[in-house]
């Protein structure tokens, strides 16, 4: 059980960092921090509506995975002796 918990914690850190990066890459509605950090990277990805849609899908998938990991870690903490 300890190995599973360790793996989940590592996955939580990785998905958290990936999720932060993906959110920063998204096109900003009014500029701000998105343009500061993701301006150069985002321009190639967001050049079309398809790119933005795919970026949104990937972000949602990582967010759902992140949420599932949080729930699993909570269940392990709740039911472990």
Image: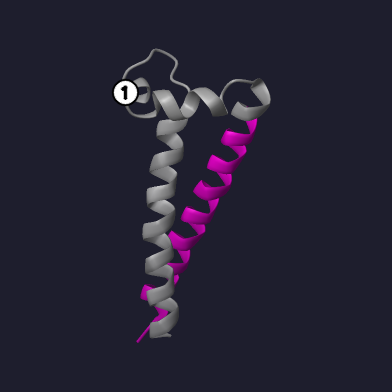
| Percent of width and height locating residue 46 | 56, 24
How many marks can you see?
1
| Percent of width and height locating residue 5 | 40, 76
Q: Is residue 7 depicted above or below 42 in this figure?
A: below
Residue for badge 1: 36
Residue interval drawn in magenta: 53-81
Quadrant where the image shows the C terminus: bottom left
Q: Can residue 48 be seen at all in this image of the molecule?
A: yes
Which image quarter: residue 31?
top left
What residue is rendered at 45% in x and 31% in y? Answer: 25
Of helix, strand and loop, which mostly describes the magenta segment? helix
Q: Can residue 74 be seen at all in this image of the molecule?
A: no
| Percent of width and height locating residue 2 | 38, 84
Residue 36 or 74: which is nearer the viewer? 36
Residue 5 belongs to the span the image colors magenta: no
Which image quarter: residue 58?
top right
Residue 18 or 77: which is nearer the viewer? 18
Quadrant where the image shows the N terminus: bottom left
Which residue lies most toward the right here? 50
| Left or right: 36 as drawn, with respect to 74 | left
| Left or right: 36 as drawn, with respect to 1 | left
What residue is rendered at 41% in x and 79% in y? Answer: 79
| Percent of width and height locating residue 27 | 48, 22
């Amino acid at each position: 059980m300890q190995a599973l918990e360790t793996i989940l914690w590592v996955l939580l850190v990785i998905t958290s960092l990936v999720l932060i990066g993906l959110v920063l890459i998204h096109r900003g509605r009014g500029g701000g921090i998105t343009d500061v950090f993701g301006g150069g990277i985002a321009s190639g990805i967001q050049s079309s509506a398809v790119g933005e849609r795919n970026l949104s899908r990937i972000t949602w998938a990582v967010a759902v995975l992140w949420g599932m990991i949080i729930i699993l870690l909570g269940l392990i903490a709740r039911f472990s002796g």
